[in-house]
Amino acid sequence: MTHVSIKELTKVYPGSLEPSLDRLSLEIESGELTALLGPSGCGKTTTMKMIAGLLSTTSGDVQFDGRSILNDKPEQRGVVMVFQNYLLFPYMSVADNIGFGLKMRKVGKSEIDRRVKEILELVKLPDLGDRRPKELSGGQQQRVALARALIVSPNVLLLDEPLSNLDAHLRLEMRDLIRGIQQDLGITTIFVTHDQEEAVVLADKVALILDCKLKQYDTPEAFYRRPIDEATARFFGGQNFVPGMSKSGYFECALGRLKLPSDALLGSATLTFRPENVKIGANSVGENVVQSKLIDKIYLGTQTRLKFIVGDTKIDVMANPSDVQELVVGDACPITLSADSLWVLAK
Amino acid sequence: MIGIESLATRSFRVITALVLVTWLVLPMIPLAIWSFARGWYFPNLLPTQWSLAAWEYALSDTAGILDSLLLSIGISFAAMMLAILIGVPAGRALGLYKFRGKEYIELLILAPTIVPGIAVVLGVHSVFIWLGLTNTVPGVILVHLIPTLPYMTLVMAGIFSNYDPSFEEQARSLGASGIKTFWYVTLPAILPGIIVGGMFAFLVSWSQYILTLVIGGGRVITLPLLLFNFATSGRNDITGAIAMIYILPGILILLFTARHLTGRSGIGGIGQI
C-alpha cells in the first residue's frame, strides 16, 4: 500500500525547447487505480518512465509515502512497469519470464516454482508455463506480462496502454481481470491510455493531460458532468457548446433563456450538455423546452444519433432507438434541456 | 508458383554449394597431396612415391611449427576478445542511436577494409616504436585490431539495429541490476552476433601476414609467416603440411558457425546497416 505524490514533475528532452511534461502534480491514494489519459505524445509514457526510474526528471519530485524516490535506482523503487508491447523475454519460457523478478531478488528455485504456479492460476493461464512467449496469443502475452509484474508484489504498478493491443472481446475480459486483481491485491496502480472509455471503465480517478499539462484530475463521472473546459468536454465526447451569458439562475443564448442549476458560474460563458442527456419532446412544466428541427438521423445499433437545429445552432443528441423510431428528418420537434443536465464552462 | 519458386531456391542452393566447393576445397587438394608426396613432377597425375616425412618434420619439436601454431592461436584469440570488447559497445552505438557525424564514424570504421594494411603499417610501425610495442606479441595483437574491428563492429551494428532496448528497461523495472540485465537480457539477444563477429575477427587475425611481419619485426613468428618461409624455400611437401594445419581453424569455425551464418541473425543483420 503506497501513497504516490507527484509534485510539479517536468521533463524537457535534451535539444527540445518545449517541455514534454509540464509541472504535473497528482496525489494518488494508496490502493487507487488511476488513469493518465491523453492523446499520444502528450507525456503520459514519459511520466510513467520517470516514476519507474527509466528516465531522468528535469525538475519536480516523485514521493512514495512522503519519501522522494528520485535518487533510487529503478530496481530499488518497488515499481514495476508493464509495457504496451508486453516485452516478454523471447529466450525464456513463460514460467521463467514470470519468475524473472523473483530470481533477481535471489528467491530460491522451489519457492519461485510455487509462486509462478500460483500467479498463473490468478491470471487464468494454469498450463502454459512451459511455452515460449511467441507461441502465445496477444491476450495471453498480456496476462503473462501482468503476472510477471504482480509476482514481485510491487508497491506501485504501472501499465502502459494495457488494453489497446487487444481485440474488443479480449479488452472486456482483460479489463475485468486487471480491475479484479488490482482490487484484490490493493496495489496502487497507474495506467496510461489514449482512450477515454478505457479510462472511465477502469479507473477510480482520471488525470487528463492535454498539451503536456494536467487539465483535470477527477473521478470519471466528473469528466462527463463537470468538465473543466471545452477541450476537456470534447475529449470525452462532448458535442454541444453554446456561447452566451450566465446570469443568476439563467443562461441567455441562441437557444433562448434556459434555467441553470444553482451553482453555475456567472458572466460571459459557454453552455454545454451531453448528447445523451437531451430529452426528446416537451415536459409538463414547459421549462427549458426548445423548438427545433431534425436535420439528421443515424442509427448506430444500440443508440441513434440525432442532429437538431435551432436557428443557426446545431444540437447533437443520442437517444434510445425505440424512443425515436417515429421521427423523420425534417420534422419539427421540441427538445428539453433539463436544468440539472446543463453545465457552464468559463470562456 | 510455389513449385517453381522452390525449384529455383533448390538449384540456387546446389549452385552455391558447387561454387563453395570449387573455391574452397579444390585449391586445397594439391596441397594435401603434396604433404604426403616424396616426388611429384609433371606429367604425372599423382606422386610417384608417397611419404610421411613432411608430416613427421612438421609435428616435430625442431620445426617450431607447433610453437607457431600456439602463438597464432593465442594472438588471434586475444585479438578476437579485444575486438568483442570494443566492437559490442561500438556496434550498439551505431545500431541503436542517432548522433551527429554518424556517417563519418561508419566510414572511419570501414576504412581499414578499404585501405590496404601495407599502406598504413609503416606509419603504425613508427608510432609503435615510440610506444615500445614493436617486436612484441602485444604489439602484434594491437595491430591485428585494425583489420578485425570493422567486421566485429559492423556485425554488432546489424544485430543492434534489430534490437529493442526496451527489454532492458523492462528487466530493470522487474528488479534486475545493470549487470544482471546485460547477462540475462542483452547477452542472449546479441550472442549470435558476438559468435559470428568473433569468428570473423579470429579468422581475419589468423590470416594476417604483412601487419605481423612489420610490427613483429621477424621476432613474432605466426603460422602464416612460417608458411611463407617454407613456400619460398621450395619445400612443397612441408608447405602442404603446414597449409593443412593452417586451414584447420577456418574449417572448424565454418562448421561451427554454419548454423548461425544461415540463420536470420548474423549475416542477415549486416544488410540492415
Image (cartoon, coloured by chain):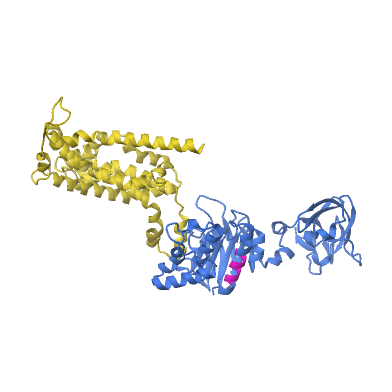
Q: Nearer the viewer, residue A329 or A14?
A: A329
Q: Residue A143: x, y in percent? A: 54, 63
Q: Residue A16: x, y in percent? A: 53, 50
Q: Is residue A273 visible?
A: no
**Chief secondary structure of the magenta span?**
helix
In the current view of this chain or complex, which residue is farthest to the left? B62
B47 sits to left or right of B202:
left
Q: Colour of chain A?
A: blue
Quarter of the view holding residue A193: bottom right
Q: Is residue B120 above or below residue A225?
A: above
| x 15%, y 24%: residue | B43
Q: Nearer the viewer, residue B7 or A203?
A: B7
Quarter of the view holding residue B150: top left
| x 64%, y 61%: residue | A198
* Magenta segment: A174-182
Q: Residue A326: x, y in percent? A: 87, 56
Q: Is residue B195 visible?
A: yes
Q: Residue A150: x, y in percent? A: 51, 69
A306 sits to left or right of A20:
right
Query: In yellow, which chain?
Result: B
Q: Nearer the viewer, residue B108 or B240?
A: B240
Quarter holding the C terminus of chain B is top left
Task: State yes or no: residue B151 in magenta.
Answer: no
